Every structure is written in structure tokens, then in C-alpha cells.
Image (cartoon, rainbow, N blue to C red):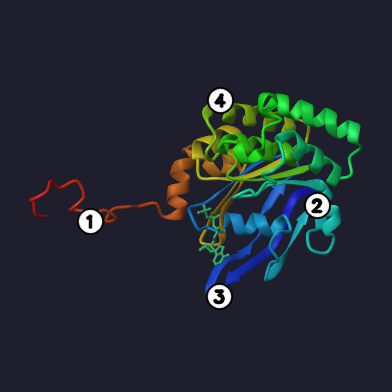
Amino acid sequence: MTDAVRTQGLFKRYGAQIAVAGVDLVVPAGSFAGLVGPNGAGKTTTLSMITGLLRPDGGSAEVDGFHVWRDPVEVKARIGVLPEGLRLFERLSGRELLLYNGRLRGLPKADVEQRAGELLAVMDLTGAADKLVVDYSTGMRKKIGLAAALLHNPSVLFLDEPFEGVDPVSANTLTDVLRRYTASGSTVIFSSHVMDLVERLCDWVSVMSAGHIVAQGPLDRVRGDRSLNQVFLELVGGSRDDGEAGLTWLGSKPGERR
Ligand SMILES: Nc1ncnc2c1ncn2[C@@H]1O[C@H](COP(=O)(O)OP(=O)(O)OP(=O)(O)O)[C@@H](O)[C@H]1O
């Protein structure tokens, strides 16, 4: 089977800073895949290059066997993206935003209206459907962003920190929608710092550190008989033995000298 995503030697630098240092990311089709790594590991930069938002300095990326930068139209038709720091058209209502996105994707009006209505209901946004997006909360923005990314039924969905700022009830809703989506053979790739969540949701995991993939494969193989959190800390050097040595003043009372 064709991999949903395959990159080879993907590379990006910003001046002297190498953000992504030759990444070979593989995600089999139908996976619920987690891309994890500490702050600054290069996750957002990698996802941006795979989704055609950022041009790589080197290497290649394929989605469903199509080259991201040679066949951009083929790739964009197959992907849905919920980027980090999502920018939405603030002066549209949630419903208008979905209708606009659907029409932009070339879907017939009647189909867009039906899908938009269903997505709004599933995301528990029917009551806010006619409210302007500028008045949405953080969690509501994530949900309408996800609805917009799903509207054209992409085969691969990329989500950058989809659960950040989302309350537990909404997180459950998002999870249910995504589980249903992958159960039908589509692929989800999401970045996260929350190991419990990745462990609960994903069957495939890629671990990034300092611009490199340091582990990748089926969750059970990467984790072995340990928790993903333990493996993660070992892989990315989570030891903090001396990290607090300089904080003796923290918590001291006024007048106390440390
Ligand atoms: N536009 C930019 N200009 C300069 N440096 C950048 C830029 N974008 C990212 N970087 C640098 O590239 C590296 C990787 O950043 P990136 O945002 O991809 O990491 P990340 O794994 O997504 O981090 P986080 O988990 O904190 O979101 C970091 O060192 C960051 O400072």
C-alpha cells in the first residue's frame, strides 16, 4: 500500500539555525499518527513543508504518492490542514466559513450545505453557527477549523496541536470525529506534547528531537513495555538533575538570604 506520507532528507534552515535536519518521516495510510517532540524540535516546520506551506531547502515530500512541490494541486486536493496559529476569516460566521471553504474546494452548493450542517452538529456548534468567528472561543475556533479541514473529505488530515486550548468535553468530540475518520481508512497526522493523548489515540508515532527523527514506527514497537512518556524522556534527554540548581531564591521569604 502507498504510504500516506513519505519524506526523504527534508531539510530547512533559518540563517544559522537548522530547524529540520534531513527528516525521513513515514506514515502508513490509515494510521492515526502522532508526531511528538520537545519545543523547537521541528514539528511545525516539518508539517508546514509537507503541506506545501513552506518550501524546503532540501529533500522531498510525498502525500499519497504525489510530490508536494511538483504536484501541488493533486496534493492539496487530498489533504486537510489545521495549522498552528490558525488564521480564520473573522468576519464570517462559522456556517459562512464552512460554505466558503466548501465552494473554494469546488463542492456543489447543496453538498456543502448538507456537510456543513452535519459538521456543525457533530462539533456541537449548531447554536453558534451564525455567530461571527471573531467571537468564538479558542476551543470553538479549533472545532470550526477542524470542520473546515474535513469538509472536502481529505484522505490525509494534518493537525498541528489540535487539542491545545480545548476543554475535555470538546476534546472528546474531536477525538470521536477523528476516530470515525481513520476507521474509514483515512489518515490523521497530528503533533502534540501530550504523551497520554498520543498513547491513547495513535497506532503510529514519530519522535523528533533537534530537527531529527529519533524513533518511528507502530506505537507498541516504539514504546515496548514502557510508557511513551518514559521512552520520550530517554530519547530527547529529559534528565533534569542539575536544572534547578540556580533557583535557590525561588520560594524564599522576604529577608531570607539564599
Ligand atoms: N520563521 C522562523 N524563523 C527563524 N527560526 C524559526 C522559524 N520558525 C521556526 N524556527 C526555529 O526552528 C526550530 C524548529 O521550530 P518548530 O516551530 O518547527 O518546532 P516545534 O517542534 O513545532 O516546536 P513547538 O513544540 O514549540 O511548537 C526552532 O529552533 C525555531 O526557533
| Lower sequence index among marks 1 and 3 | 3
Do the numbered discs 4 and 3 sit on residues whose CB atoms are within 8 Å? no
Q: Mark 1 points at which residue?
A: 245
The foreground one among 158 and 236 is: 158
The foreground one among 145 and 202 is: 145
| Lower sequence index among marks 2 and 1 | 2
> Which quarter of the rendering shows the C terminus?
bottom left
Task: Report, in whole angstroms, how far the alpha carbon at label 4 lies from the one at label 1.
Answer: 39 Å
Q: Which of marks 1 and 3 is in front?
A: 3
Determine whether the beta carbon of the residue marked 1 sits less than 8 angstroms from the nearest atom of ligand 1.
no
Determine whether the beta carbon of the residue marked 3 sits less than 8 angstroms from the nearest atom of ligand 1.
yes
Give me the disc on residue 76: 2
Q: Nearer the viewer, mark 2 or mark 1?
A: 2
Tell me if I can see residue 157 in this picture: yes
| Lower sequence index among marks 2 and 4 | 2
The foreground one among 218 and 56 is: 56
Please, is residue 62 above or below residue 185 in the view? below
Do the numbered discs 2 and 1 sit on residues whose CB atoms are within 8 Å? no
Give me the disc on residue 169: 4
Under circle 3, the secondary element is: loop
User: Crowding at label 1, few (<14), some or many (≥20) Cα neighbours within 10 Å?
Assistant: few
Determine whether the beta carbon of the residue marked 2 sits less than 8 angstroms from the nearest atom of ligand 1.
no
Give me the disc on residue 15: 3
Task: Report, in whole angstroms, how far the alpha carbon at label 2 lies from the one at label 1.
Answer: 49 Å
| Lower sequence index among marks 4 and 3 | 3
Tell me if I can see residue 203 in this picture: no
Under circle 1, the secondary element is: loop
